[in-house]
Amino acid sequence: MTPVSRPSADALRMIERLIAFDTTSRNSNLELIRWIEGYLAEHGIASELFFDDEGRKANLFATIGPGDRGGVMLSGHTDVVPIDGQEWSTDAFRVIEKDGRLYGRGTTDMKSFVAVALAMVPRFQAAPLKTPIHLAFSYDEEVGCLGVRKMIAGLADRPVRPQACIVGEPTEMQVIVGHKGKLSYRCHVRGFECHSSICHTGVNAVEAAAEVIAYLKAMVRRLRDDGPHDPAFDPPYTTVHTGLIQGGTALNIVPKDCWFDFEFRYLPGTDPHRLLAEVQDFAATKLLPEMRAVQADTGFTWTELSEFPGLGTADDAPVAELARSLSGANRSGKVAFGTEAGLFEAAGIPTVVCGPGSIDQAHKPNEFIAIDQVAACEAFLARLTDRLSA
């Protein structure tokens, strides 16, 4: 298989067009979605939109080819992470090509895949497809894989649904059959204020939160050392991470409130709710009695932030074999980061992850994708078109 070093001009122009939309998750994505809807309409393709409850954001679903049978779905999210606080050398929402790379927010994660799929639409349309190609573009993936659930629910009861899905997250075009799931929570610790000189008469919310966070750290050490382990992942164990904390008002005031956010990135087959229950039990049995001995109106409130399942597609599943044959790979892999793939799999649509770019570049300032990765993705989708037309 001869490698292609540079993608088509159409693919490059499409990447430039999509990056220009600031679809940071806090923003609406409707301007981008309406543009895609219009682009597809110009090629005679109808789109179906699945909106959020406020009508500010939407998923887009479209089918190219025969509509009376299942097909292969190409899935990508349209939102990107913020650039706030990051030091960019270029305009993050304008593609800059330099030294064989395309710079811009979303070039890797993951508008290049979406752009290549859209640039291929004329070829999809011209091909004598015997099996359809579906396009599925979602919102709010970056904040917990939230938006795609509306689309999955909308497709659930249809007599004809996609038979397979390829999620184009950045894997350097390697075929991924497994990824970790995620469960994230916010803990609010309610303490009791007093002057710090008589701190024994108060309940320090920051210190109670610190003890829970220390327990979470001990938990990840245990998981690291004792497992369960899956060497196909890096790291090969379930991880626990505290990423945000806020509490207190002044040094001479015993803090009344503290909030912290934490997450479990868990191996497929692991029950994260059991891990959560363990942490909650520690807080309730070891910390709460001492807190309430000082002040009854103290405690812990636990609020779920997000949850999505892991992916565990069988290595010999038809979708995995198809993706490997299109990529030229001899084997599949697994990754630690999460995607919407686990939700598609849970909905009964066999799914793999395979897309251009490296996750190492995602969420960073000066995000980029190598141009030859875009070319490899374009070649992958061209081979898919030929396969589904045979």
Image: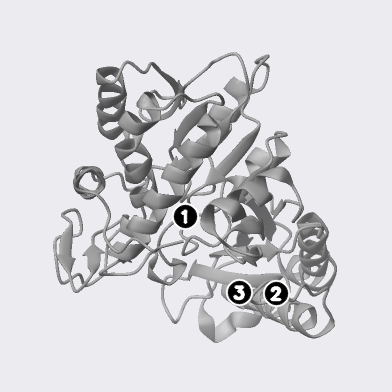
**Image: 220 above or below 65:** below
Q: How far is the residue under mark 1 from the one under mark 3?
A: 48 Å
Indicate which disc, 1 or 2, sits on the residue closer to the N terminus: 2
Q: Secondary structure at mark 2?
A: helix
Q: How far is the residue under mark 1 from the one under mark 2?
A: 33 Å
* Structural crowding at the residue carrying mark 2, measured as other residues with C-alpha within 10 Å and reported as few (<14), some (14–19) or many (≥20): many
**Image: 284 above or below 12:** below
* Structural crowding at the residue carrying mark 1, measured as other residues with C-alpha within 10 Å and reported as few (<14), some (14–19) or many (≥20): many
Q: Secondary structure at mark 1?
A: loop
Q: Are marks 1 and 3 in contact (CB under 8 Å)?
A: no
Q: Residue at x 48, y 54 (%)?
A: 169
Q: What is the three-letter code of the residue carrying label 3?
A: Asn
- Which residue, given by chain and number where applicable, does mark 1 sit on? 355
| Location of residue 193 (image quadrant) | bottom right
Res. 210 mark: none
Q: Are marks 1 and 2 in contact (CB under 8 Å)?
A: no
Res. 216 mark: 2
> What's the image's color scheme?
one colour
> Is 260 or 263 nearer to us in this picture?
263
Q: Secondary structure at mark 3?
A: loop
- Which residue, given by chain and number where applicable, does mark 3 sit on? 204
